[in-house]
Image (cartoon, rainbow, N blue to C red):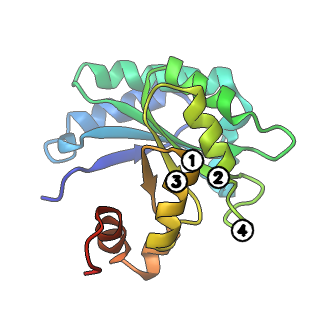
Amino acid sequence: AEQPVAIQLFGGVPDDVDYAVRAVLEHPVLSAAFAIDINMGCPVPKVAGAGAGAALMRDLPLASRILRSASAAASGYGVPVTVKFRTGWDAASADTPAFARMAEQSGAALLTVHARTRDQMYAGRADWSVIAAVKAAVSVPVLGNGDVRDPASAAAMLRETGTDGLAVGRAALGDPWIFARIAAALRGEPMP
């Protein structure tokens, strides 16, 4: 009953992603999703080790084929494909704006940037300047992710990056009310 809802998938084989997208969009309940999000940012070994998630940051041609496959499958249902990714596999190989341009050219309708490399996992400080660089490099909407933990950090990210919106991850695990507080603060309303 809650909307909007997106379904997030990951995979390292374009045909598998095509199959998964069609299975979701033909399902009687899951087909209510407003978007299919392809996870190209998961850093955990069982995902990245299988050539999916953040591992795709090291193989732009394969990442492009996966996004093109997902976009082609979803287009028949009128559903957009989005993608979440990190700043790169590691700092030495990161070219986040190039990855973002590839994602846009491959059919992604929205990009979510987790401003950490795969090597950082969930540690260290998110580099919001990378989100700003991605926003400047593409024409599709961009969401910023990383170190948004309260209304003040949400407002700071929006101000510093020019991003179109925010994605909140770990902060919501211990505080499911964070979304209502951020929304109220951004609208200039009292905290709920």
Position of 43 relative to 102 (above/below): below
Q: Could you give the CA–CA distance between mark 1 and mark 3, rounded to whole angstroms?
A: 6 Å
Q: Could you give the CA–CA distance between mark 2 and mark 1, rounded to whole angstroms?
A: 7 Å
Name the residue nearer the viewer: 34 or 23.
34
Residue on which the image places disc 2: 128
Q: Earlier in the sequence, mark 4 or mark 1?
A: 4
Q: Are marks 1 and 3 in contact (CB under 8 Å)?
A: yes
Q: Are marks 2 and 4 in contact (CB under 8 Å)?
A: no
Residue on which the image places disc 4: 123
Residue visible at 26% across and 50% down in the picture: 5
Q: Could you give the CA–CA distance between mark 4 and mark 1, rounded to whole angstroms?
A: 21 Å
Q: Are marks 2 and 1 in contact (CB under 8 Å)?
A: yes
Work out which quarter of the rendered image holds the C terminus and state it.
Answer: bottom left
Q: Secondary structure at mark 3?
A: helix
Question: Which callout, 4 or 1, points to the residue nearer the camera?
Answer: 1
Badge 2, how many Cα within 10 Å: few under 14, some, many 20+?
many
Q: Earlier in the sequence, mark 2 or mark 1?
A: 2
Residue visible at 50% across and 19% down in the picture: 106
Q: Position of residue 50 (x, y in %)?
A: 66, 44
Name the residue type under label 3: Arg
